Amino acid sequence: MTRTQWPTSPFTPAHRTFRLLIRTGLQFDARGHAGLPQRPIPLDLLARLLLKPEVTPPVRDAVWRQLVRLARTDGPNRHSWVMACVGVALPGLRRAAGQLARGWHGDTGDIDAEMLIAFVARLDSLDLAGPRVVGRLLDAAIRAGKKARSQAARADAPHTEGAWSRAPLQPWGHPDFVLARARARAVIDRDEWRLIAATRLEHLPLADVAAELGLEVDLAADWRRKAELRLADAISVGELDYADLDVTRRKRQQRFGQERERALAAFARAYRRTALAAAG
C-alpha cells in the first residue's frame, strides 16, 4: 500500500480492521454478563454497550477479562481477538491520544503507535484478577505515549554549544528519566524499578506487582520503601544529575522504531486477512 492508503498512525487501520472483523461475523458471547443481551452479540454492539453508564464496573471488568483470555488462548483466532480488544478499546485510546496531543505541534503518528504497541503488549501480561481491566490496559498505553512524546521533545530540542548557559539536566524533569538514571547508576535494581514504576506511576496495586515478581506483599513493600529512600538520597546529593543515558536512549529509540514497524506490518497483515475473510 502507498502512504496515502496506509496511514502512519495505527488507529485508522485498527479501526478498519475492527469494522471488517464485524463483517466476518465474529461475535462475543455475552451470556452470563448482567445487563447485556444473553446471547452472542456483534463486536460493535458490545463496544457501544460497554460505554453505557448502566453497565457496572464489575460487569465491564468481567467482559474485558473474557476478551483478554480470548486474545491469549483462542488458537488460530487469537489475532482476531487481539484486534477485537483494540477495536473495543479504540474510543478510550483515541481520547487518551487526543489529550496527549494537546499543545504538541509535531507528528503524532509515533506517539499513537507506541500507545497501541503498549496496549497490545499488556494484553499478554496483565493480571486479570485485579479491577479496572481496561483501565490498566489504557494506563500502559498512556505511559508509553507520554514517554514517546517526552523522547520526541528531547530529540527535537536544539543543542548549541556556547550560545547560552545551560542548566544541568535535572532528574525531576520526568519520573521515567529519574528511574532510568537510578538504574543506570545502580541506585536501584530491576525489581525495585518495577515496584516503583508500576505502583507509583501506573498506579497498579502493590499486591499485583508483588505477585508478578514472586514476592510477599510485606516484602515488596519493604523493598520499595528502602529503594525509594536510596532514590531520594541520590537525588538530594545530585548523584543522578549527570547520568548519561544518550547511548541507552538511542538504542531504545532504535528498538522502538523496529517494534513500531513490526506492529504496523502486523496490523496491515491482520487487515488483509480480515478483508479476505469478509469478502469470502
Image: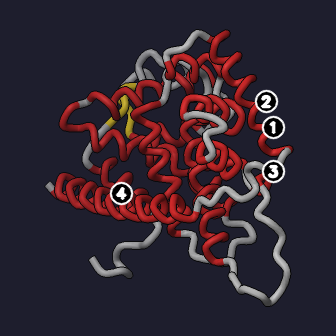
Q: Earlier in the sequence, mark 2 or mark 4?
A: 2
Q: Earlier in the sequence, mark 1 or mark 4?
A: 1
Rounded to the nearest angstrom, the CA distance separating label 4 from label 3 is: 39 Å
Rounded to the nearest angstrom, the CA distance separating label 2 from label 3 is: 14 Å
Residue 242 picture location, percent across and down: 71, 59
Q: Earlier in the sequence, mark 4 or mark 3?
A: 3
In this picture, residue 83 sits left or right of residue 269: right
Choose mark 2 or mark 4, whichever is in front. 2
* Neighbours of disc 1 within 10 Å: few (<14), some (14-19), many (20+): few
Q: Amino acid type of disc 4? A: Ala
Query: Would you name the residue on which mark 4 appears?
Result: 263
Quadrant of the image containing the N terminus = bottom left
Rounded to the nearest angstrom, the CA distance separating label 1 from label 4 is: 38 Å
Rounded to the nearest angstrom, the CA distance separating label 2 from label 1 is: 5 Å
Query: Would you name the residue on which mark 1 appears?
Result: 232
Label 2 SS: helix
Label 1 SS: helix
Label 4 SS: helix
Query: Would you name the residue on which mark 3 appears?
Result: 238
Q: Residue at x 51, y 45 (%)?
A: 89
Q: Which mark is residue 229?
A: 2
Farthest bottom residue in view: 163
Circles 2 and 1: CB atoms closer than 8 Å: yes
